[in-house]
Amino acid sequence: MDRLPLRPYAFGWFQVEYGDALKRGDVRPVRAFGQEFVLWRDHDGTAHLMDAYCRHLGAHLGHGGRVVGNEIQCPFHGWRYDGRGECTRIPYSPDASLQSRGMRRWPTVESNGLILAWWHPQDRPPSYEFPRLPEYGHGEWSRYHRHAWQVQTVWQEIQENIVDSTHFHYLHGVESLAVVDRFEPRGPVLDVNIVHQFKTPRGVQRGYIQTTLYGPYLATVRFRIGDLAEILFVDAITPRETNEVELRFSLMARLSGIEAPDMSLELVNEAIRQVSQDVPIWNHKAHRPRPSLARGDGPVMKFREWARQFAVETVPIREVACGLAE
């Protein structure tokens, strides 16, 4: 039995890195979608993601490549590429034609302290955006608490948890059986709201988890318990290999405008605890295309219908001809 009979990759925006982890002039290799990329930041401060292998003789720019001004230089023969992926210089052949020698670049943006890139195997342009979060950098909210997990699964299995309302009680010990009171798809965006009852030092309190998915790999999650505590985090999935993903949470705790800021910080730990309980399930569970569902399971099949729009054939894009030696 194939444990995960799903296409492992989908098109969309994904997190490449944290912005503060990539300084001006930094170059590093990135593995995603079973491919090699190079991530670099030019001297003007702009981050770029490109295919990794030099168009000349295939050196990996992420291993030994260096930034020269606003260009990246191959470590092997000194070819240079700009942020658009265009070849700008062959130092030992100054008269050589540079056309058709460029590298494929991937649309890259920096927002909310995250470096995001757009991936589509057919090289189609971005079809939606990830929003700016007004809470990021706001004085009422903490800086990011960062946590990551390596999971042997595919993106859909992780994001399906968002609508699997009953597992919060049985796996995570939430006081009540949760109820999905909103499931609203808007093209590539999906809004989900789940209502819970939580045990707190001030008695049982009503709370909710509001999630908005922006494509397959990025979501914002707001977790609030009454007027006591609140957190907001970015749920980011980066597919590494066919059935291997990195799941990153970037969590902010609300520290003012709420009754119990210490409880907000505890909610950060609680979110990390719950996902750490999910990981061994994801590592070993099988995807049931036709699950035997029961009343109260949540809108699992509606979620899968929404998710299908991102499935694509991962046919590699043909490289343009390199041109003749001169």
Image (cartoon, helix red, strand yellow):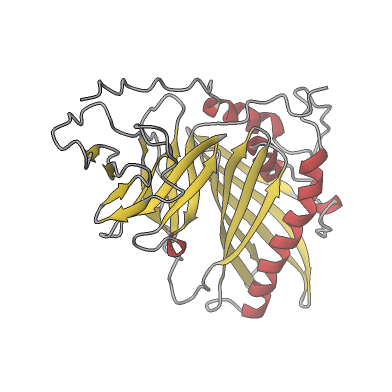
Q: Nearer the viewer, residue 95 or 152?
A: 95
When asked about the image quadrant of residue 318, the answer is top left
Residue at (45% x, 65% y) in the render: 136
Instruction: Say which quadrant the N terminus sits in.
Output: top right
Residue at (24% x, 56% y) in the render: 69
* Visible residue check, residue 155: yes
Q: Position of residue 245 (x, y in %)?
A: 64, 43
Q: Nearer the viewer, residue 145 or 130?
A: 145
Q: Nearer the viewer, residue 240 or 311?
A: 240
Residue at (60% x, 57% y) in the render: 249
The reply, left or right, for residue 213 in relation to residue 290 is left
Q: Nearer the viewer, residue 136 or 14?
A: 14
Instruction: Say which quadrant the C terminus sits in.
Output: top left
Residue at (70% x, 72% y) in the render: 266
The furthest residue to the front: 92
Q: How many marks?
A: 0
Q: Position of residue 74 (x, y in %)?
A: 35, 44
The furthest residue to the left: 95
Q: Position of residue 231 (x, y in %)?
A: 60, 65
- Image position of 25 with respect to 269: above or below: above
- Image position of 304 with respect to 229: above or below: above
* Visible residue check, residue 260: no
- Image position of 177 with respect to 324: above or below: below
The furthest residue to the right: 170
Q: Position of residue 225 (x, y in %)?
A: 67, 66
